[in-house]
Image: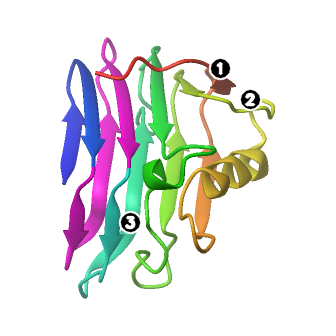
Amino acid sequence: MNLISLSSASALIDGNSVRQYNGAGVRLVMNDGNGTLDATVRGNTVANPAGFAVNGLLALIGTTGGTENTTSCLNLGDATTATLKNSLTGSGGSGATDIRVRQLASTTVKLPGYGGTATDNAAVVSYLQGRNNPATTPTASATNTGTGGGFVAGTCAVP
């Protein structure tokens, strides 16, 4: 399931089952200098990766060396309601992580309920793990390699 924003997009990805995928089970990309991506991803099951799978959920906001200067919002899972958490454990193929979020270029990524600092990747990982997998903890990675605002708390509008 791919959502690639070449301008501005809002998406609700809710209650899906994604299996036997290659690449990423759910892929969210914002890579246009003037675009934004506001995505709510909740209540999904991503499992049984195929031979060329990498991440269960991959979010790329900006591009390496790009000129993007926007704010996007990622509402991934839910902090308290188990049925809104995404089930991703075991979805990272080839030794990769179940969830991977990257903030690149001059972008800012809003995360509802996030309490860490803009460049604290470990805090983002903990945040993502707590909002997903009601039964077990998914593996996760976050990278903040841009010059923008990094990861911040914020509110996403559910489409």
- Of residue 14 and residue 21, the one placed in the foreground of this image is 14
Residue highlighted by disc 3: 56
- Which residue type carries mark 3? Gly
- Which residue type carries mark 2? Ala
**Pointer 3 or 2: first along the chain:** 3
Q: Secondary structure at mark 3?
A: strand
User: Would you say 45 lies left or right of 112 here?
Assistant: left
Give the number of callouts.
3
- Asked whether the beta carbons under mark 3 and mark 2 sit within 8 Å of each other, the answer is no
Badge 2 density bin: few <14, some 14–19, many ≥20, Cα 10 Å: some
**Which dot marks residue 118?**
2
3 or 2: mark nearer the eye: 3
Q: Position of residue 15 (x, y in %)?
A: 27, 52
User: Would you say 139 lies left or right of 5 here?
Assistant: right
- Asked whether the beta carbons under mark 1 and mark 2 sit within 8 Å of each other, the answer is yes
Q: Secondary structure at mark 1?
A: loop
Q: Position of residue 6 (x, y in %)?
A: 20, 26
Q: Quadrant of the C terminus?
A: top left
From this view, report whether residue 147 is shown above or below residue 18: above
Q: Position of residue 87 (x, y in %)?
A: 43, 66
Q: Which of the colour schemes (rainbow, by chain, secondary structure, one colour) is used?
A: rainbow
From this view, report whether residue 103 is shown above or below residue 141: above
